Image: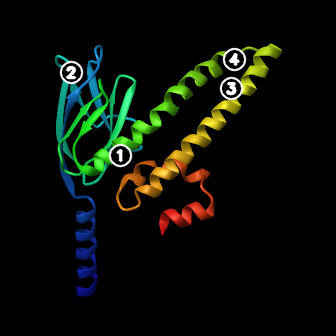
């Protein structure tokens, strides 16, 4: 009985350590027209926090799991940050971030990927327009758009893989591994995990 009790207490202690919460403080600026900034936890659809914008500025604070990946969304823009206890100043308007070295590294990778997001958005708009058009010309262009999207995804995954390999000494790969895991071969996985 004593053995079971000790095991149960140790299990509860381990859970408490895993679920340790850390305070976050995030403030910043947004472009004109944005009224609310939302905070999402990685993999969740419903916002966990939000802040009303006042004269182009927002601020939010709370507690989340230590090192949680949190996504901040303002209008059509979004950026991830780690909850590492260091205050974050995020300027959506001029695309700058001040915070911990870890969040600066994460932000730099995200900025490098924006070129893909912009191109993909244009191609996806064209794809949506073409997919309902059954004319031969539209169907031919649709195939071209799909091929361009595939090339874009390949290039983005290559850049992500480079960023993951360059940041093996920190948590940055945790924010992106889910995006590239299905495009990695065994050698890439071995290199990342070593």
How many residues crowd around disc 3 within 10 Å: few (fewer than 14), some, or many (20 or more)? Answer: some
Using the image, determine if residue 156 lies above or below residue 74. below
Residue 43: name its quadrant.
top left
- Sequence-wise first label, 2 or 3: 2
Q: Secondary structure at mark 4?
A: helix
Name the residue rendered at 46%, 54% in the picture: 164
Q: Position of residue 183 (x, y in %)?
A: 61, 51
The colour mode here is rainbow
Residue 123: name its quadrant.
top right
Q: Position of residue 47 (x, y in %)?
A: 32, 34
Mark 2 vs mark 3: give the one in front: 3
Looking at the image, do the residues carrying marks 4 and 3 touch, with CB atoms under 8 Å apart? yes
Q: Quadrant of the N terminus?
A: bottom left
**Which disc, if any, is residue 53?**
2
| Residue marked by disc 3 | 145
Name the residue rendered at 50%, 26% in the picture: 118
Would residue 24 be found to the left or right of residue 104 on screen?
left
Mark 4 vs mark 3: give the one in front: 3
**Which disc, if any, is residue 130?**
4
Q: Position of residue 83 (x, y in %)?
A: 25, 48
| Residue marked by disc 1 | 106
Measured Cα–Cα span from mark 1 to mark 3: 30 Å
Would residue 12 be found to the left or right of residue 122 on screen?
left
């Amino acid at each position: 009985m004593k053995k079971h009790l000790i095991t149960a207490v140790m299990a509860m202690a381990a859970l408490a350590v895993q679920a340790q919460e850390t305070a976050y403080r995030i403030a910043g600026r947004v472009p004109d027209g944005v009224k609310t900034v939302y905070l999402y936890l990685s993999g969740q659809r419903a916002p966990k926090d939000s802040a009303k914008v006042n004269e182009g500025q927002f601020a939010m604070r709370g507690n989340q799991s230590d090192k949680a990946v949190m996504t901040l969304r303002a209008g059509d823009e979004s950026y991830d940050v780690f909850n590492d206890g260091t205050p974050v100043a995020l300027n959506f308007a001029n695309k700058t971030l001040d915070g911990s070295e870890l969040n600066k590294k994460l932000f730099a990778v995200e900025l490098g990927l924006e070129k893909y997001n912009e191109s993909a958005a244009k191609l996806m708009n064209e794809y949506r327009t073409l997919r309902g058009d059954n004319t031969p010309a539209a169907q031919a262009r649709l195939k071209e758009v799909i091929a361009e999207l595939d090339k874009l995804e390949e290039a983005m995954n290559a850049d992500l893989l480079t960023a993951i390999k360059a940041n093996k000494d920190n948590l940055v790969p945790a924010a992106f591994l889910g995006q590239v895991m299905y495009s990695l071969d065994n050698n890439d996985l071995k290199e990342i995990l070593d």
